[in-house]
Image (cartoon, helix red, strand yellow):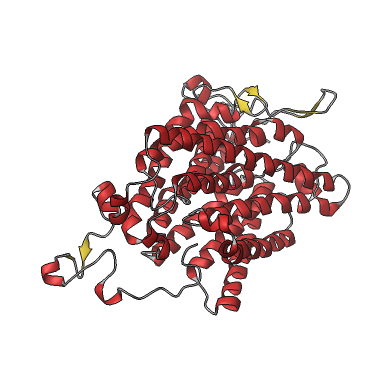
Amino acid sequence: MSVPVAYQGNSSLAVKEWLNKGDNAWQMISATLVGLQSVPGLVILYGSIVKKKWAVNSAFMALYAFAAVWLCWVTWAYNMSFGEKLLPIWGKAKPALGQKFLIKQAALPSSTHKYKNGTMETAMIEPFYPMASMVYFQCVFAAITLILTAGSLLGRMNFRAWMLFVPLWLTFSYTVGAFSIWGGGFLFQWGVIDYSGGYVIHLSSGIAGFTAAYWVGPRSTKDRERFPPNNVLLTLTGAGLLWMGWAGFNGGDPYSANIDSSMAVLNTNICAATSLLVWTCLDVIFFKKPSVIGAVQGMITGLVCITPGAGLVQGWAAIIMGVLSGSIPWFTMMIVHKRSKILQHVDDTLGVFHTHAVAGFLGGATTGLFTEPTLANLFLAVTNSRGGFYGGVGGYQFVKQIVGALFIIGWNLVVTSIICLVIRVVIPLRMPEEELAIGDDAVHGEEAYALWGDGEKYDNTRHGSYSGDETQHNNNKIPSGVTQMV
């Protein structure tokens, strides 16, 4: 039986024999879904979850990071993350811009996995689509990592300092985690499991954000005391884009539209839904009110927790991971945070340490317990991998997961600190007090909400006195929601 022309290779110069059109389409869709998580997803979420006077600045920090990462990625950072090996933690820096590189079949040249005796265990990763699709897919992951890091720094970081922080952290931190675990580095070769970024993206952004928040310093006292979201409904819009976009986040990491990608998408939704419900129930039980912002936090911790093992665990394990991700980060944020001097001292604006570092570590550890052998063989380079729950070498896998997490934590603590110390030599990390007092208008000369009343520009001669970002009739009312902010 002849193959239909539409499915044949070499049907045109743009359809090579190695090209799988379905895989290529899914990979570009997945990349676009992840991109939409950032722009507009996190742009909307950040711009709405903060106090009104910081809406523009917060949204712009996300938008700037997305754009800056793109240029750095194709100029040098892609090959540092997924190119030929330079060091056990780094690939060789070089551009990913020429057509000879971009139109050839995708490959991760350092991903060949070998036994201890040097013989090949698993061949090099070579998806059936062009390098251009791979560069695109991996870029949006790098971009969202920086944007997540920004969540710890909203409401006070000097924007010029942020402009320097993004390329420096991408170059000296993100690329190391990506190559070490995904690109063929020493943790990849050792068999540390991170299906789609629980360590590379979430643990690293949580630790980097917390570390940078320490060096930048806190928000103004007034902002720390009261920092209500300016638009809860838009926060839900951004959160919805995050949740739906995670289908590409986890579903695209098998580098193919295959069985494993289907498992990953299904488990992602199971865990996120479970975590959201558990977080909400805990809010109701202990604080007597279901918090919308709390539900968003629970959704995020569920999505983060399942990420390291999305296509590797069974559905029942995804539910267990959801229960844990809806309760342990809730406990660290709502109980431990209020009793810890160091957590109180460091002003982590959106609680990224809890939602990403704690949840990412938890996800990596539970992946070391619940990785199912049959599913592992569909994806992992190390054959016969399994979680501790399945006996055999599974206990050792759990140890590998902990060691991998400790490497990511240690590297980010040190490198993020060095980057902040270098930047503050030339640019203050924190805004001056006069900008902190005013917000967007002082920093950008723009405000998120220019209209007053029914389509009118605010005029204090017509609309009465107005102070700060509170309306006169609501000046002293404190929101009663449980999880207003850390």
Q: Is residue 135 above or below residue 444?
A: above
At which x and y percent is residue 97? 46, 24
Residue 52 lies, with reference to residue 290, above or below; the image says: above
Residue farthest toward the bottom in the current orientation of the protein: 288
Question: Residue 215 at what x, y percent from top left?
Answer: 48, 44
Instruction: Examine the image and state in which quarter residue 162 appears.
Output: top left
Q: Could you say which is closer to the camera, residue 451 or residue 346?
A: 346
Residue at point 40%, 51% (across, down): 43
Residue nearest the observer in this picture, 4 or 432: 432
Residue 309 percent across, percent down from the top left: 69, 50
Residue 188 in view (yes/no): yes
> Can the viewer see residue 128 in this picture?
no
Tell whether 302 sits left or right of 41: right
Residue farthest toward the left in the current orientation of the protein: 461
Q: Nearer the viewer, residue 339 or 254?
A: 339
Quadrant of the rendered structure where residue 466 is? bottom left
Q: Nearer the viewer, residue 411 or 126?
A: 411
Q: Position of residue 382 (x, y in %)?
A: 78, 37
Total label count?
Answer: 0
Q: Residue at x 28, y 47 (%)?
A: 443
Q: Residue furthest right?
A: 392
Q: Is residue 374 left or right of residue 84?
A: right
Please tell me in which quadrant of the rendered image residue 30 appears. Answer: top right
**Quadrant of the image for the N terminus?**
top right
Q: Is residue 46 left or right of residue 389?
A: left
Up the image or down, 378 lies above or below 352; here it is: above
Which residue appears farthest toward the front when viewing the image?
341
* Residue 299 in the image: above or below residue 277: above
